[in-house]
Image (spheres, grey):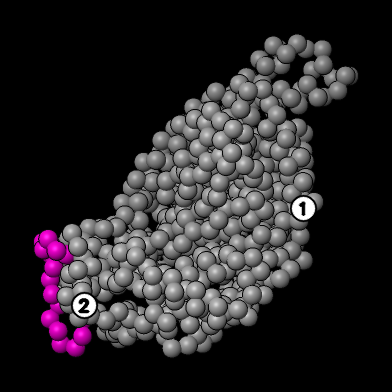
């Protein structure tokens, strides 16, 4: 059976009808992982289960505080030019640490930790690209830029989305439960692939993974990146972006993706490397493998005291720790260039990328003055294989500071002694039955800022509200979700537009000499309804609701399997 697949694709394994289960791109470029780029839905490492694939060794609370301090400094405008006043920063930080009264005394940064953070700033400055403003964000694998998108492209984007914003109120697509604060301009969950309903050259599944959607898939578009980095749309359309009414977006989105490319390259390059070695002094061995881990907090041969069940430890831990002699790990003596490895990057040029496009406005009014934020999540389902996300906050007005927070799943830390609750508390702020997950920082989501990060990390947008409660305000967001470049999923190149209304618009625009011009709108609607492969808006919304319910169930199971696994001490 001839599926009419583009000649650059090869088909592997087909069902009884000749429809491919999976499509692969031609041979992978040098540096691309054979098993695909990492995402939280599958295990690219041999001999590791899916739940372990997304997890990495935990970092101590002290190291996370060092990273938070570093990013706080790197949020200072033109920080790379201000490093000459590092000594003043050092004095301010040490004074702040000394006056810390928030109950975090067991996690006070030492002078050596502060010195390490300040020395490391030179490494971060070397990674910053002065032309694009791309620099490391709050944690490894997260990148940001405040000057990536030129004002001319931003103005064109603002102009292009006007056709989606300026529609009659009944046609506006407000997010359910958002109190009319989340306006969906381009929602990739609308008119998705519906297995058993969507007509295409062949609807297959991406590789492996459990659980997976058995019914739905968001529809990406194919974009070709030439050897010089220029991006062009290869698919006939972008899902939910009207080809004539929203024509301006068809030039803006490829240009935005072209500018986002270096950020995607940095994120993916980071995910195929192990995380940087720890910034604190470590030493631990297990079998023949050297495994970085923080040393035990108890000195010498001191027996680990077990505070479990003791009121003083439970109610006043600071007092309990004050009565026991322990040591916390200090920073390595000097920064010695660990960040240099992040300069080695893969290239996404000279290949086709699949990208899912989303446009959202957060709209606040005096009647609805607060955005409540969102829960922890990753993007998509296993069959969509999203590996990285790019978010551009292209406009903001009259809203308070907002942030996007990140967390990652971690493996169980190495226990130093059975039942050593206090040690795990001091090193990782971890207690029995707490989830094996660590917050790795947050980034301010201000106007003009771009943020790119791996889908391995869960993220959530935190609440914000009107700055002046008597006036309206908004935040406008463009999101690009990158499908694993080593694999292909069904896209807009395989599925014709499913929007019934687009057919009616095409018939209306066929010209005065067309037969359609003589037909009333009621007849045009009947013709469109007879096309089995097209969906009405109400049908598409019903599928979106079902897709959303499936996604909620998946998030619950995925969290249980990866991001909310309970920590248990040995012997518990």
Disc 1 to disc 2, how far (Cα)? 55 Å
Relative vertical location of residue 334 with respect to residue 562 in this rendering, above or below: below
Decide if residue 9 is on the left or right side of residue 156: left
Query: Picture quarter containing residue 492?
Result: top right
Instruction: Please give the label number shown on residue 151.
Output: 1
Decide if residue 440 is on the left or right side of residue 541: left
Q: Secondary structure at mark 1?
A: helix
- Residues packed near mark 1 inside 10 Å, few (<14), some (14 to 19) or many (20 plus): few
Measuring from the top left, give residue 233's x and y in whole percent.
73, 50
Q: Secondary structure at mark 2?
A: loop
Decide if residue 446 is on the left or right side of residue 235: left
Count up the numbered dots.
2
Instruction: Please give the label number shown on residue 127.
Output: none
Quadrant placement of the N terminus: top right
Whether residue 186 is visible to the viewer of this picture, yes or no, is yes
Provide the major secondary structure of the magenta segment.
loop
Q: Are marks 1 and 2 in contact (CB under 8 Å)?
A: no
Nearer-N-terminus badge (1/2):
1
Given residues 472 and 448, the one toward you in this image is: 472
Callout in the foreground (1, 2): 1
Whether residue 268 is visible to the viewer of this picture, yes or no, is no
Instruction: Please give the label number shown on residue 416.
Output: 2
Query: Picture quarter containing residue 304?
Result: bottom left
Determine the residue positioned at 55% across, 81% down: 87
**Residue 240 counted in the magenta span:** no
Magenta segment range?
A: 298-313
């Amino acid at each position: 059976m001839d599926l009419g697949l583009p000649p650059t694709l090869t088909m592997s394994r087909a069902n009884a009808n000749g429809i491919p289960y999976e499509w692969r791109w031609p041979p992978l470029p040098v540096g691309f992982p054979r098993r695909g780029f990492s995402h939280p839905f599958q295990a690219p490492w041999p001999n590791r289960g899916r739940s372990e694939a997304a997890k990495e060794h935990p970092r101590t609370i002290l190291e996370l505080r060092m990273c938070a301090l570093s990013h706080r400094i790197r949020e200072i405008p033109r920080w790379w030019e201000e490093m000459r006043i590092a000594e003043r920063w050092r004095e301010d930080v040490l004074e702040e640490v000394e006056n810390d009264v928030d109950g975090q005394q067991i996690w006070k940064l030492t002078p050596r930790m502060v010195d390490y953070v300040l020395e490391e700033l030179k490494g971060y400055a070397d990674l910053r690209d002065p032309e694009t403003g791309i620099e490391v964000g709050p944690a490894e694998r997260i990148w940001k830029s405040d000057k990536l998108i030129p004002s001319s492209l931003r103005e064109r984007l603002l102009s292009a989305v006007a056709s989606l914003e300026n529609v009659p109120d009944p046609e506006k697509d407000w997010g359910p439960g958002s109190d009319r604060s989340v306006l969906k301009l381009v929602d990739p969950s609308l008119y998705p692939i519906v297995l058993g309903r969507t007509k295409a050259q062949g609807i297959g599944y991406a590789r492996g993974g459990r659980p997976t959607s058995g019914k739905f898939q968001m529809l990406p578009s194919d974009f070709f990146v030439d050897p010089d980095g220029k991006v062009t749309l290869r698919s006939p359309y972008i899902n939910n972006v009207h080809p004539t009414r929203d024509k301006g977006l068809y030039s803006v989105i490829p240009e935005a993706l072209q500018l986002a490319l270096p950020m995607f390259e940095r994120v993916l390059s980071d995910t195929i490397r192990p995380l940087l070695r720890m910034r604190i002094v470590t030493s631990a061995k297990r079998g023949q493998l050297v495994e970085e881990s923080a040393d035990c907090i108890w000195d010498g041969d001191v027996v680990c005291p077990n505070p479990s069940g003791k009121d003083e430890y439970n109610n006043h831990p600071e007092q309990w720790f004050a009565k026991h002699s322990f040591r916390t790990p200090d920073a390595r003596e000097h920064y010695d260039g660990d960040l240099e490895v992040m300069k080695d990057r893969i290239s996404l040029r000279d290949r086709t990328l699949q990208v899912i496009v989303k446009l959202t406005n957060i709209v606040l009014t005096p009647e609805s003055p607060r955005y409540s934020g969102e829960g922890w999540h990753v993007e998509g389902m296993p069959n969509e294989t999203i590996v990285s996300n790019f978010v551009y906050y292209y406009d903001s007005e009259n809203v308070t500071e907002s942030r996007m927070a990140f967390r990652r799943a971690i493996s169980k830390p190495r226990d130093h002694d059975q039942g050593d609750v206090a040690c795990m508390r001091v090193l990782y702020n971890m207690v029995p039955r707490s989830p094996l997950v660590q917050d790795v920082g947050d980034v301010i989501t201000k106007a003009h800022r771009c943020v790119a990060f791996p889908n391995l990390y869960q993220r959530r947008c935190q609440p914000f509200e009107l700055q002046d409660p008597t006036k309206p305000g908004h935040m406008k967001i463009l999101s690009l979700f990158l499908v694993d470049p080593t694999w292909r999923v069904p896209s807009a190149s395989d599925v014709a537009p499913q929007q019934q209304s687009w057919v009616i618009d095409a018939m209306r625009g066929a010209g005065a000499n067309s037969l359609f011009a003589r037909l009333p709108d009621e007849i045009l609607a009947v013709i469109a309804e007879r096309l089995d492969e097209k969906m009405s808006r109400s049908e598409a919304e019903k599928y979106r609701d079902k897709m959303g319910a499936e996604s909620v169930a998946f998030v619950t199971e995925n969290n249980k399997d990866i991001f909310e696994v309970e920590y248990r001490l040995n012997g518990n």
